[in-house]
Amino acid sequence: MIDFFFGLVATWGLLIIAASAYFSCLAVPVPTFAVMLSGGAFAAAGDLVLWQVLLVAYLAALAGDQTGFRLGRTGGNWLDGFLETRPNRAALFARAQQVVDRWGSAGVFLSTWAAAPLGPWVNFAAGAAKLDPLRFFIWDALGEAIWVAGYVLLGYFFASHLDALTTLVADWAWLLTAISLAVAAGLFLLRAKN
């Protein structure tokens, strides 16, 4: 499947990178990490331009996050209806609501890169919680800069080892999420104890 997305980047370039980054921020199951790694690798080979890959992925991710935030802010009924028939996604949304309730803007920041699988759901939850749009944008923009730069630059600097890197990163994304959530829970418990 990774080869399929690698082929799409080879054929469609920046368009696939943009579509992948945008739709992944709306909880569409796209292996965006593989697409961004591929974009970085193609930039290293000279087939794409590095700054263009970074900019397109970044702007598309911001647009996707803003769309999710706006949908959460204005479309509670459709979201409730969607989640009623999808219990696994409803559980992710419930976790995202807890992140937003406990951490607010910091939760948005961390969800874009440290807990990326939860990120799209945090976008919806932040909108539904009526988080300040400017605060959401600022913290989201900072987090997306880390997420996009991290994946694209990994692909760029380790292009010759893309297959191994893709496998490693696929496993590491969930591990990083679990570690981040454990650290956040520990900090919350320490804060609650004092």
Image (cartoon, rainbow, N blue to C red):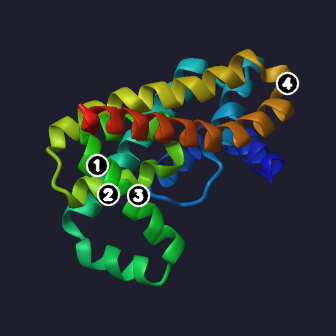
Q: Name the residue under label 4.
A: 161
Residue annotated with mark 3: 95
Relative side of 105 to 24, left or right: left
Separation of marks 1 and 2 at Cα, in angstroms: 5 Å
Amino acid, disc 1: Val
- In the image, residue 40 above or below residue 60: above
* Viewer-closest of 48 and 17: 17
Amino acid beneath label 3 = Arg
Is the C-beta separation of discs 1 and 2 under 8 Å? yes
Q: Foreground residue, 9 or 192? A: 192
Label 3: element kind: helix
Q: Above or below — where is 1 with respect to 162?
A: below
For the C terminus, give its image quadrant. top left
Camera sees residue 43: no
> Residue drawn 27% across and 33% down?
191
- Locate residue 186, reporting x and y percent: 42, 36
* In this view, 93 is above or below 132: below
Asked which secondary structure carries label 2, the reply is helix
